[in-house]
Image (cartoon, helix red, strand yellow):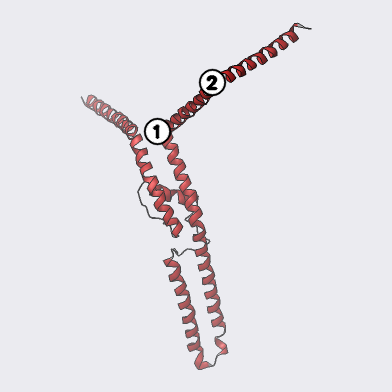
Amino acid sequence: MRPGQVYVVYRSAARSLARSNMRRRQAKDPTSIDDQRICTKENCLRCCKKFTAFMFSRVGLFFVMIGYVALGGVVFQALEAGNEHDMRHIMDVELNNTLNKLWGEILSVNSFPEPYKKRNFSLNATRELEKFEETVIRQVEKGFDGRTTNSEHDWNFFGAVLYAVTLVSTIGYGHITTKTNQGKIATVLYSAFGVPLMMLFVANIGSTMAKMFAFVFSRITMIFCCRMSNKKKRAL
């Protein structure tokens, strides 16, 4: 047998002997298994503490806020985009139907006797316009903004993200608002968790922002003072 093969056999035998000895010790001392479980729990708790500390740090809160705002954009887009498209589609259909009916009335004017042409056309046109007016009023009460399906949609991802930012930052820009009941409930719940999270984030980075502002202000003041002193020296 070659020396290399002897070494391999010897190493595998040593590993087998070590494993058998460990099993015997565990069988004689069952507390070793409990110690291993305790160590595993301690490691898990230690990892949880590190993760929690990172999440409440400046970098962690920054990523949490980005994730929270992105999640809000996805949620509000899912809740409001379909309703916005449906309202615009309904108004497009109603407008086309009304225009077609009015055009039909115009073409059928010649079929009436001369004394009744103007009267019948006025009555029919007024009736169609009143129906369209009622439809417009109902859709406006539901949140219709007067734009058609070909116009740019407010509730795309970026518009929904902007709405989420206005909620957590309490700016309240008001460019778009939720129209559905699900969206209004989601707004309340999202703000209830988002506003305290934003306050915590601002309080955490407040000292850093103050130091940056002080540094920039001192640099600007120094440059301004140096230029003023140079001008005075040149004047002398």
Give 2 or 174, whichever is nearer the viewer. 2
Q: CA distance from mark 2 to mark 1?
A: 41 Å
Q: Secondary structure at mark 1?
A: helix
The N terminus lies in which quarter of the figure? top right
The C terminus lies in which quarter of the figure? top left
Q: Is residue 148 visible?
A: no
Residue 106: x %, y % from top left: 54, 82
Residue 153: x %, y % from top left: 49, 57
* Residue reaching furthest to the right: 1
Is residue 187 positioned above or below 226 on the image?
below
Give 180 or 104, whichever is nearer the viewer. 180
Where on the picture, by quarter, is residue 53?
top left
Where on the picture, by quarter, is residue 69?
top left
Left or right: residue 33 compared with residue 63: right
Mark with earlier residue (2, 1): 2
Residue at numbered disc 1: 58
Is residue 60 positioned above or below 76 on the image?
above
* Residue ID at (47%, 29%): 47
Residue 163: x %, y % from top left: 42, 51
Residue at numbered disc 2: 32
Left or right: residue 228 compared with residue 212: left
Classed neighbour count for the residue bearing mark 1: other residues with Cα under 10 Å, few (<14), some (14–19), many (≥20): some
Where on the picture, by quarter, is residue 209?
top left
